[in-house]
Amino acid sequence: MKNSLQSTYYCDCDHPDIQELAAILKSDGDDQISLAMRTFTYVRDNIVFGFDLFQVKASDTLKRKYGACWNKSLLLTALLRSNQINAQFGSIPLKRNFIKPAIGRWSWLANSPYNHCVVHAYINNRWTIIDAVLDKHTYETFYSPLGVEWGIDWDGKEDVSLYTESISGSSVMHQDIDAILNKKVGNNELPKTLASIGNSVINRQIWKKTGFTG
């Protein structure tokens, strides 16, 4: 766990904006489980689901107020580390159909399996997987109507496991966050300019239905 509290280039938990929010989240108490739960809920619902590039700092995702699994997991990791909760950036392989309800035909651009990003937080004397990628509006718009067996809530004890019908392997922790993000967590991505344009198109499609104004 020697590097699970460190600030890195992308996981910039020492950034003033990250530090300020971490302090606010801690102001209601520093019990680690309760604090981790508040931090999870904040990232889940205040940073809405939407696509951005892989190589984005946690502090920038906080400013933009949206992100994909890699962006939101990075921000959650940074906030937890800022409050001295050991956290590691992780990923879990999923069949690419996991994202089809939200983005439709665009899902065919994803590799399969797709390395979906999560967070491993050391609480309850174990590494607990937490996944804050789907805010309530996105979940209720695209996934809840399908009658999926999983939800997006966290009780502070068990792992948060989304997309259970698409899981095709075990979750892994990435010790070097910057290196894995520079490799796009092993996923496909168009060249930066094209990726930015594609993300904008997909986000407009998603947000038109969820009501987020960007």
Image (spheres, rainbow, N blue to C red):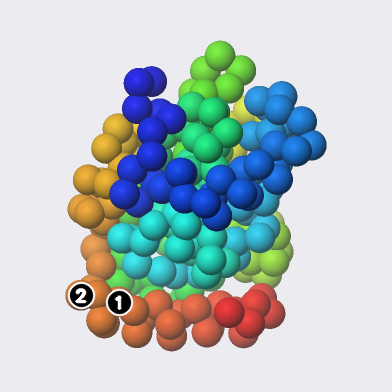
Indicate whether 212 appears above or below 32. below
Residue 131 showing in the rendered view: no
Q: Position of residue 92 (x, y in %)?
A: 38, 42
Classify 10 Å Cα crowding around label 1: few (below 14), some (14-19), many (20 and above): some
Residue furthest out toward the top: 125
Residue furthest out toward the right: 28
**Element at badge 1?**
helix
Q: Which residue is mark 2?
A: 191
Classify 10 Å Cα crowding around label 2: few (below 14), some (14-19), many (20 and above): few
Residue furthest out toward the front: 16
Q: Nearer the viewer, residue 170 or 40?
A: 40
Report the residue at 30% width, 76% height from top.
Answer: 195
Q: Are marks 2 and 1 in contact (CB under 8 Å)?
A: yes
What separation in Å lies between label 2 and label 1 (alpha carbons)? Answer: 6 Å
Indicate whether 78 appears above or below 34. below
Q: Position of residue 69 (x, y in %)?
A: 46, 55
Q: Amino acid at mark 1?
A: Ala
Q: Amino acid at mark 2?
A: Pro
Indicate whether 4 appears above or below 183. above
Q: Which corner quadrant of the image does residue 84 belong to?
A: top right
Q: Which residue is mark 1?
A: 195
Q: Nearer the viewer, residue 212 or 169?
A: 212
Report the residue at 66% width, 42% height from top.
Answer: 23
Indicate whether 195 appears above or below 113. below
**Element at badge 2?**
loop
Residue 183 showing in the rendered view: yes
Q: Tell me: 176 left or right of 25.
A: left
* The C terminus sits in image quarter: bottom right
Report the residue at 75% width, 38% height from top.
Answer: 27
What number is the disc on residue 116?
A: none
Report the residue at 59% width, 61% height from top.
Answer: 47
Q: Position of residue 105 (x, y in %)?
A: 41, 78
